[in-house]
Amino acid sequence: MENYPDFLKNVSFFRTLPDSEIYRICEFCTKKILKSGEVVFAEGSRGQLFYIILAGSVEIVKNYGQSDQDRIAVYRQGQCFGELALIDDFPRSATVLTLESSQLLCIHRENFQKVLQESAVISFSFLKNLTAMIRERTDNFIEDLKERNRNLERAYTRLKREIEDRRRAEKRLHHQAYHDSLTGLPNRALFLGRLQEVLRNSRKSKKHDYAVLYMDVDRFNAINDSFGHMTGDQVLIKIAERLRNCLRRSETLARFSGDEFAVLLEGTADADESILIARRIKDALKEPFSVNGKDVHISLGIGIVPGGEKYSSTVELLRDADIAMYGAKTKGRAEFQTYDEALHEKTMDLLRLENDMMGAVDRNEFILEYQPIISIKKCRLAGFETLVRWIHPERGVVSPDIFIPIAEKTAYILELGRWIIAETCRQVREWLDCSDAKPHFFVNINISGKQFLQPDFIKNFKEIMDSAQVPGAYLKVEMTESVLIDNVDYLADVLSRLREMGVKVALDDFGTGYSSLSYLYKFPIDVLKIDRAFILRMGEEGEKDLVPIIISIAHSMKMEVVAEGVETISQFHRLAEYGCEYGQGFLFSKPVRKGEAGRLLLDGSENDLCIWPGMLPGKYCREEDRSDEC
């Protein structure tokens, strides 16, 4: 019988029974030994045994072996289960499995009922305790149901919250997928989707009352280079705000990429309405933007494409919009251009030129011409300005006004610019070697803003000079005023290093771009070149003559002055009166090839007499060149 009575006394049914009655029950008990993982009984089965755990442990499982299997409880030594089997043949409410090797004390229903019939004490105690157990189990079951209900409610609340969070996340992801993260505007994908829908509707209705405006910020790279990309991003945000405020809700504004924006107009009456909106956008950007405490003027190049029957895809329409925008930017800052077939043909021609330009340096298609620069005081040749020419194998001479912007746009200007420096230095060395007298002259080299901003510009420039054995005193670099606003501190350092090499710096086209007297103080500039527009207005009735003022400012800052575009004797005489040091223009000579330039240089080195007759009364001229005005 081992220690069965001790286990029976722990069972609530038998806890109040005297020991004599406990021993009577023990006579009918049997022991069952099970391995780990064995099923004691299965859910739904009918059993006749009541169990008490002598050793080991079991788990009570609902829906055993199914997807919604649920462990209800774990019973250990001294605990009992299967009590209802002592009363009747009830179906088991759960499956019981051993969690380890276990020993179970079993009481068969028939044997237990015999004990009940023979002992009123056991019968009364059992019924009383069974009633209490059922009540307790019922209360526990109800509380368990309530807890499960609370868990379900909490689970439902969590699930509802997760669904809402997922919906918000999906909405946020959708917004991110179709909107620009910087400006919050619709992005390229959303714009193309709406444009595709507009094209589809226009084909159905046979109405083409729409238009696309494609826009690019003028000289935005200068802002990034001067103030940094973070500041550039803030400028784009401000541009987006102004554009949004000047457009109607029905007009879709999108940021395509970088500094490119687009507007989709629906229900436009004609091309004139699109032009009015383009003007409205221009007006919205007239007020300067505050960038790091400074006022910066921002403008857009705008390409306009009215809707048309020929457009069947967004690709075609945006291609033409890009062509129109490119046409606007070639006209200058803050311009707009409406697309037409002539513009398309012109653009395609420029694209063909762009393709032809690649490798033109290696094919020796570029040459240099030299425009003489004359000393006005001495009336003799002082130097040259190098001008690059492209001799196209099929088109002949291509104007620099056409191919230089292409080179700037494609960055081919870096390769071309390096070749110009190298060829100029080679030619200077050749002229020096041809003269025993070593004539003093200078040659001006035009340098692109992109070249100045290259980290290895000074290194490459010096290497070319050293390789050609050309002293810096024979060279001057020319830059336009627009270069001055790009990376002020960096550019000032580059120009100072050029000076250290003996190379002088000339500011070209002074007065036509972004001139500020503060720039003349910030940069080591040696020469001011007055734009021909000022020279043409000298002496004209009703026009203010600014040339003497510019010359006076330059001289006060120890700078020399070159007048560009000198075409008449009267202009020459007036410049002499103003004290202008140098002049260049068709009055003296058009740009010439290197052979003619060398002849002029060597002829001028033989004496200091005037080689251009009739320029300056009272000065000596060669006898054969003397005119009535000398």
Image (cartoon, rainbow, N blue to C red):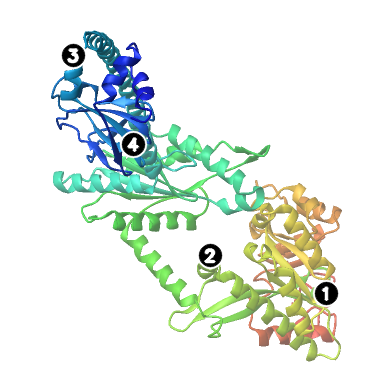
Mark 2 sits on what residue?
A: 405
Q: Is residue 23 visible?
A: yes
Mark 4 sits on what residue?
A: 103
Local SS, label 4? strand
Q: Is residue 131 above or below residue 487?
A: above
Mark 1 sits on what residue?
A: 473
Q: Residues within 10 Å of mark 1 (few under 14, many from 20)?
A: some
Mark 3 sits on what residue?
A: 118
Q: Of discs 1 and 4, which sits in the foreground?
A: 4
CA distance separating discs 3 and 4: 29 Å
Residue 417 shown left or right of residue 497 in the figure: left
CA distance separating discs 2 and 4: 96 Å
Can you say which quadrant of the picture contains the C terminus? bottom right
Local SS, label 2? helix
Instruction: Name which of mark 3 and mark 4 comes first in the sequence.
Output: 4
- Give the residue type at disc 1: Ala
CA distance separating discs 3 and 2: 118 Å
Depth check, front residue: 158 or 315: 158
